[in-house]
Amino acid sequence: MTRLTVHTVGVRTVQTTGAQLIAQARPGDRVTILVPAGLGRDGVEWCERTGRVMIKSPGHLALDLGGQHGTPGVATADNVVRLRQRTV
C-alpha cells in the first residue's frame, strides 16, 4: 500500500510517498515514523515517534529516537510520516 504524505513547502502543498521522503533524507534530518502502541478495541493502535537520521541505506533509514542510550528505530516507505530537513 502506497500512502501519500502531505507537507508544505513554502506556500504550496506537496504530496509525496514514503519512498520519495526516504530518497530525500540525509543524515542529521528529523524523520517521524509510525510505531505500534498496543492493542485497542479496533485492533493495533499507532503512535508517532521522531528521530534523527544516522545511517541511510537503500530502502530504509536508521534513526536515533533519543533517550539515554539512543533508542534505535527504522524508517521504511511503509511507516514514514514526515521529513524535516535540517538547514545548512
Image (cartoon, rainbow, N blue to C red):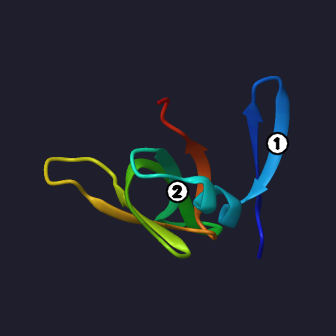
Q: Which amino acid, by three-letter code, is at mark 2?
A: Ile
- 27 left or right of 48? left
Q: Which mark is residue 59?
A: none
Q: Residues within 10 Å of mark 1 (few under 14, many from 20)?
A: few
Residue at the farthest left position: 68
The residue lying at 48 percent from left, 52 percent from top is 26
- 54 left or right of 25? left
- 66 left or right of 10? left
Q: How many marks?
A: 2
Q: Residues within 10 Å of mark 2 (few under 14, many from 20)?
A: many
Nearer mark to the viewer, of 2 and 1: 1
Quadrant where the N terminus is found in the figure? bottom right
Reply above or below: 80 against 87.
below
Look at mark 2 in the image and give the residue it sits on: 33
Reply above or below: 6 against 20.
above
Q: Nearer the viewer, residue 39 or 14?
A: 14
| Label 1: which secondary element | strand
Q: Which amino acid, by three-letter code, is at mark 1?
A: Val
| Label 2: which secondary element | strand
Q: Position of residue 38 (x, y in %)?
A: 46, 66
Earlier in the chain: of badge 2 and badge 1, it is 1
Residue at the farthest right position: 12
The residue lying at 14 percent from left, 47 percent from top is 68
The residue lying at 75 percent from left, 32 percent from top is 9
Q: Position of residue 66 (x, y in %)?
A: 27, 47
Q: How far separated are the C-alphas under marks 2 and 1?
A: 18 Å
The residue lying at 56 percent from left, 62 percent from top is 45
Q: Which mark is residue 14?
A: 1
Reply above or below: 15 against 37.
above
